Structure formats: structure tokens, C-alpha cells
Image (cartoon, coloured by chain):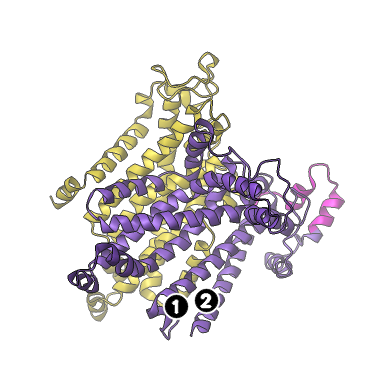
Chain colours: A yellow, B purple
Amino acid sequence: MRTLRILARNPLSVVGLVLVLLIIFAAVFAQYIVPYPTHNGSVIDFAFANKPPSARNWFGTDLVGRDIFSRIIYAYQISLTLGVVVLAVATPIGTIIGLLAGYVGGWVENVLMRLVDIFLSIPPLVLAIAMMGVLEPTLTNAMLAVTVVWWPWYARLVYSIARAEREEGYVLAAEVIGASAVHISFREILPNCLPAIITKMTLDMGFVIIIASSLSFLGLGVQPPTPDLGSMVAEGARYLPDSWWLSVFPGLAILVAVFGFNLLGDGLREILSVDK
Amino acid sequence: MVLRTLLNRLLISLIVLVGVSMLIFGIARVIPGDPARIALGPNATTEQISKLRAEMHLDESLPSQYFHFLIDLSRGDLGTSLYTNRPVTLDIAEFLPATLELVFLAGIIMVSVGLPLGMLAARYRDSWPDSLIRVFALLTVSAPSFVWAVILMLLFAFYLPIFPIAGRISDIYEIERVTGFLTIDTLLAGNYAAFGDALRHLVLPAVALSLSGIGQAARLTRSNMVETYEKPYIEMAQAYGFFPSRIARSYAFKPSLIPSLTIIGLDFAAMLGNAFLVEAVFAWPGLSRYGVAVILRKDLNAIMGTVLIISITFLIVNIIVDLLIGYLNPRVRYSTRGSA
């Protein structure tokens, strides 16, 4: 009930929720809703190549005549899959390392957090680019590279909460009655980290989409003919300003998706009353 | 005390830097295939390849290879680029200034637009300027900088031809290279027309690069200032009847600046990465374009050198940010434990 009230007070979060649900729905049921379901592959239709937006093709067509609207919906499938996989792998890794460093302390804390510092002292996109530089440009490798960049942020977040919680009375109480370190970390401290983790995951969904599309924009991500928002913008940018729809619509598609996740994340932050 | 803080900070940075070099070395050794064969091309003989393998210490153990890498590094030797056939250090010296010029200007734009926007939002919190700034800030962080680059280029270089489309300076100007920063070199040459031209070339890429940072800086400054507004000393200033503008400027802004500075350090890292995207759109002849070119050619020495230099730049900026925070915050300045 409280959740609903806060949501209602926060119309922007409702907009975010609607955007996110729409995009997830469109991506999941792409085959059934896009006007040209076959255009996610190497279809060629030169009669309709490079056409501006029209009633037939809402966002125009690309250089070989594929419907850009259809390809954007398919590209959302890839972006969302990548985001979910990256966060599903990076979050537990970062959380466990953060909990260990924050609760156990001592040399464990020193070693783990210096390791985190090392990963955080290479700009995220540069680290991901460097990794893709030596790996083959495939979806799996892009997921791997973004995950390697992402876990340290969760380690640092959970670490800072766990270190503060370590001093709390309930942790002391659990220690006094002889609870194990594993029990205290996962059953006592972890639940207090969850609101912050969930909020960060919602916001990060958008940022993972940004970094992944940046990789494919540089030609280091998913390869054509698979539709990807970043590579669509890169390809279209060469035909500015005449064929502006080639790059502008995929670019706006990134903006809309990330904006949705950001609005929703902002609302969640308030609902779960996460401070930072 | 300040000196001790500085030394402490430098020591930590040095440890992190060694770790970074190991990480980069590790990534470079993941590469499939023989670096010597890639370097020499498909027509090389077996003898040539084994000779280069020996020169590159590729037949030795990994720790020994890393040791050689460190020795060369300490001599300022990053090896030869397979792409340009020149020492990597020379390539970096040529391309780094263009990127730094772009990132510095973007940083200045970010601070001078982002902080005031955040201040404004905090002063008029929960009213329409606040909502407007919130939506603007969220929009700017919601698109990668290459999207902003494409949109800005379309609007302000093609439709309204105010700014040049690409490059660093028009071909008509011949500027002698002193620092590599064109805005400085043109002034040194006393050529003000060329300076204006170089500046005009900088505007669109720098704005595209700064947009997401502006949003982040504004959001953070707002939330910090709103927190500060709840402190008793602000209430007291209000009770004294000070003007709201004076309270905002003199009492609420300064304490809120400290956490904002940390984020600015992080945003600088993001910009060093995003420069890869913006330089690609605007054909900006910087380190990032070089970086992408060498990555596509699997040019190991150049890849490692580029990533290392970017990380060092980032570390230096972070040290400066930390010292600045120490200077601004008396609690850190006079603390005997030194800053973390």
C-alpha cells in the first residue's frame, strides 16, 4: 500500500515503470508484434532501401531495405539479455566479496579491497574495450567483458554497508550466541544490503545497456547482421545528415530504454528509502 | 600533516599502479595466437618468428615476461607499435594532447554547468525548476555520449551550421607543434584566428562528452545541498533573516561541494573512456582513435601502452581530487589519521 502511495506521488517513476514494462514486453514478444519479423537477419529488399520514415516503415529503412523499427525491437532483446546476464553474474560475485571484506576485516579486507581498487582505477569503458581488443567480438565475450568491469562496483557498495553494520548491536548479539561468520554475513548483514543492491541493479540495467552499446558502436560487440543499437548508430552515422533516421532512431531507442530504468530506479530508491 | 597525507596517497597509488600493470599484462596474454606471428604477418619465415619471439621474451615464463615488461616500463619503453612501426611512447605523445584537451574542456563545462544546476534545483527544491532540472539531468545520463555526439552534430553542424563538422582545426592553418594542445599552440604562435578556429572545433565534441557528467554533477550537488539545508546552522542563518541567495552561496554550497568532487573524479574516468566514442563520431585525431585502430589490428604493445597511460592519467586526477578535498575539508585537513 505504502509502495503504491509513493508511486502515485511520483508520476515520473510511474512513467519509468510503464516504459520498462513496455520495452520488456516488446522484446519478449518481438516475433509477434514487429511489422517485419524476418528483418533481424540478412534480409535484402533493395526496392525499399534507405527510405525515410513513412506509414509503411515508421522509422524508415536501412541501407539494404530492412525495417528499422523491427530491428530496434529485436535489438532490445539483445540489450536486455545482456543486461540481465551481466547483473545476474556480477551482483553475486561483488556481493560475496564485499560481505567478506566488510564483515571479516583484517588482511582479507585489505587484499580484496585493493583488488577492487585496481579494477576501479581503469576507466570502465577502457577496461571493457581492452578486453574486447584481445577477445573475439561475440555476445558472450561482450557479456564477459562488461561483467569483469561491473562486479567491483557491487563489492564496494556492499563493503561500505557491511562495514557499518558490523558495529551494530544485532551483529554483536548474533556473535554472542555463537552464530557462524557465514550465518552473520548472509542471514544478518545481507538483508540490510538488499534495498541498496536492488536499487543499484535497476539503475545499472540502463548503464549496462549504455556500455554494451558503446562496445558495439566501436565494432567490438555483437556483429552484423544481428541487430544491435550501438552498431546501428555507428553504421548510420556515416550517412549523416541525409539518412539521419539510420542513426537517430536507434540512438533514441537507447535513450528511451535507459531513461525508463533510471526513472524507475529513482522511484525505487525512495520506496526502499536507500540514502545513497 | 599534508605531506604525510600526500605520501600515503602516492604509496597507495603506486601499489594500485603495479596491480593495474599486472591486470593489463594479464589481459594482453589472454590473446589467442602468437603475438610474434601477428606482428610479422603471414609471409614471415620460421627463423624470423623465433628471432622475434626471443626478442619479445615470449619463450620465457609468464612472471619472467612480466618482469621484462616492468623493466622496459621503468625505462619509459613501451615497445614498438605494429600499426605505426614507431615506439608506442612516441605515438602516445602525439595523440594524448588532443584527447586531454577535449577531456579537460568537457570537465570544465561539466563543473561550470552541472554544479550551478544542482544548486538551483536545491534552492527551489520540490518546485518546478527542481523537476525540470531533474528530468534534464536524467535525460543526459540516459544516453551514451556517441548518441549525443550524433544529435549535436546533426543539429549544430548540419542543420544550423554554427560549428565545424569534424577534425581539430581547419586545413588553412599551419601551427607549429609545441605542447600538442592546439588552443595553447595557436596562442603561442600569436595566431588568434587559428585559436578561434580550434576552439570552435572543440565545442561540439566537448559538449557531447560533458553531457552525462553534467547530469550526474547536478543530481549529486542537489541531493548533497538538500541534506545540508536541514542542518541547524542553515536554520540559524534563516532565522537571522539572511537572503536565500546568500544562504545558498555561502552556507549550503561549500559543504556540499566535497562529495561532489569525488564524483567529478569518477566522471573524469568516464570521460576518458567516452572520448573513444566522441572521437569516433567527430573524427578527432586523439589517443582514443589510435586506441581503436590498434585494437582492431591486435597491436599488443600499443594496446597495453594506451590503457596504461589512460589509467595513469586517471590516477593523477584522483590524487589531485583527493588533495583538493583534503584542502576544502578541515576535518580531513587536521585529522591525524590522514585521508583515506
Residue B339's tag is: 1
Residue B133 place in picture, x, y as percent: 32, 49
In the depicted structure, whether residue A5 falls above or below residue A76 = below
The answer to the question of whether label 2 and label 1 lie on touching residues, with beta carbons closer than 8 A, is yes
Left or right of B258 on screen, residue B306: right
The residue at the point 74 percent across, 57 percent down is B90
> Between marks 2 and 1, how big is the CA–CA gap?
8 Å
Disc 2 designates what residue?
B9
| The magenta stretch spans residue B19 | no
Q: Which residues are magenta?
A: B28-53
Report which quarter residue B173 is drawn in. Answer: top right
Badge 1 amino acid = Ser
Left or right of B48 on screen, residue A112: left
The residue at the point 72 percent across, 70 percent down is B71
Mark 1 nearby-residue class (10 Å; few <14, some 14–19, many ≥20) = some
> Nearest the camera: B58 or B244?
B244
> Nearest the camera: B309 or A119?
B309
Residue B315 place in picture, x, y as percent: 55, 66
Q: Between disc 2 and disc 1, whose residue precedes?
A: 2
In terms of secondary structure, where does tag 1 sit? loop
Left or right of B153 on screen, residue B214: left
In terms of secondary structure, where does tag 2 sit? helix
**Mark count:** 2
Image quadrant where one finds the C terminus of chain A: bottom left
The residue at the point 58 percent across, 37 percent down is B165
Residue A76 place in picture, x, y as percent: 41, 36
Residue B127 place in picture, x, y as percent: 22, 51
Mark 2 nearby-residue class (10 Å; few <14, some 14–19, many ≥20) = some
Magenta segment, principal secondary structure? Answer: helix
